[in-house]
Amino acid sequence: MNVYDSWRIAAMLDARGYKSTNDVADADIIILNTCSVREKATNKVFSALGRIRDAKKPSALFGIVGCVAREAGADAFRRMPELNFVLGPQSYHKLPDILENPDARLLNIDLGGLEKFDEMPQPATSPTVCYVPIQEGCNHCCTYCIVPYTRGREISRSFDDVIRDTKYAAKNGAIEICFLGQNVNGYKYTDKNGNEFRLSDLIRQTAKIPEIKRIRFTSSYPTEMTDDLIEMFATEPKLLPFLNMPVQSGSPDVLKRMNRPYSLDGYLEIINKLRVARPDIQISSDFIVGFPGESDSDFEQTLDIARRVRYINSYSFKYSPRPHTAAAIMPNQIPENVKKERLAILDSLLNEIQHEFNNSCVGKTMQCLYEGSDKTGKHLIYRTPYMQQCVVRGTPPDGEKISTIKITAASKASLRGEFAND
Ligand code: 5AD
Ligand code: SF4
């Protein structure tokens, strides 16, 4: 979501005649887009701001946008008096106000509107992989998560607006659409006539756009994985056979304290249904280790679920206490060294499973999306339907963004391949 937001902010400035630079000392405006989901990222923000303040030219405007801005609010100006603007994740479309009135301080951390999507100009070109936000905020209120505070309650964009953006992206170069939302499969929009639209309707409609060859969505909440959506994996070949559906923990007790009220049997049943719908589907997950009260046996159960599902491309994190969350004040917080040890064990298991999956791809052919050349310029980088990076030697067939690649070798982190028709 932050990658998307940064792209829109850059496009907004581009439309006003600004050009991007990698040199802080050369910039007229410097915007730090921030994430507050874990403490470490938050802590980095103010030290980065200090470095920017010391390096920038005196007339340059600088400020923060995103979730740390929302969390810090006016306090950000107390911590860094030189800041020009502090804009929350739903108010960055207000950025032009500071350009028009550079001597004022701009603070806006309001929630509740999606007007940013409508008020900003559409970017002139689309990247090959185009993110399209369909909903923002989250009603789930997991006890560890700051997102419901920083991004607010769930709001879904109108079906017509999303399809308009998708068609626009297709016309301007997008090949792959990735629908975005904190709780993307909870998407629900009712129009004036009472017609209800779900994520499955968006997928079906998008699959009809000829330029769009691949569709995916992230991030999904297990209990919102409804049958109509599962069915899409059987009926829409453009929908990639890859789904991020975070389980977070394999322990029912921990899940209860996380306020994630699903049973592991129910979760596994959803995966079974997905595999029936699309036998080649692979699942990825996010995991949190060291949640308050997590015992050795709770942690073992997390390893167990990872072994059973054989997740690929997953993310794992040490639990990080966040302000405005219930878990931060729960008893039995886990010491840092234990969290670190558990994370290393889980990471090593996840890497082993990923490596095994990568090995199983050798000899197969896959439709892969061209991403660009590597630094040496000698290799081409492709993305498989499972989001693995695949390095290919040779010249791509003229202008084609999707190619059939035969996988020839695998490592833990990536694949090697060749054009299947060579
Ligand atoms: N500590 C650690 N990880 C967290 N996440 C969310 N909140 C926290 C936290 N307080 C992780 C979850 C989520 C991902 C985006 O970040 O795994 O799925
Ligand atoms: Fe946070 Fe995701 Fe839970 Fe929502 S479902 S509260 S975004 S972890």
Image: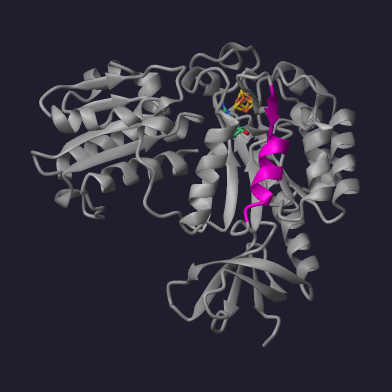
Which residue shows up at 69% across the image and 57% down it?
Answer: 386
- Residue 186 lies left or right of residue 64; in this view the side is right
Q: Residue furthest front?
A: 193
Q: Quadrant of residue 258?
A: top right
Nearest the eye: 123 or 255: 123
Magenta span contains residue 308:
no
Which residue shows up at 68% across the image and 29% down it?
Answer: 197
- Residue 278 lies left or right of residue 247; in this view the side is right
For the image shown, how many numbered marks are present on the structure? 0
Quarter of the rendered image showing ligand 2:
top right
Q: Main secondary structure of the magenta part?
A: helix
Which residue shows up at 62% across the image and 53% down it?
Answer: 209
Q: Position of residue 300 (x, y in %)?
A: 80, 35
Nearest the eye: 77 or 346: 77
Mark yes or no: residue 31 visible: yes
Q: Is residue 302 above or below residue 411?
A: above
Q: Position of residue 349 (x, y in %)?
A: 74, 50
Q: Position of residue 137 (x, y in %)?
A: 55, 24
Q: Position of residue 74 (x, y in %)?
A: 28, 16
Q: Residue furthest bottom?
A: 422
Q: Quadrant of residue 106?
A: top left
Which residue shows up at 21% across the image and 54% down it?
Answer: 23
Q: Which residues are magenta?
A: 195-209
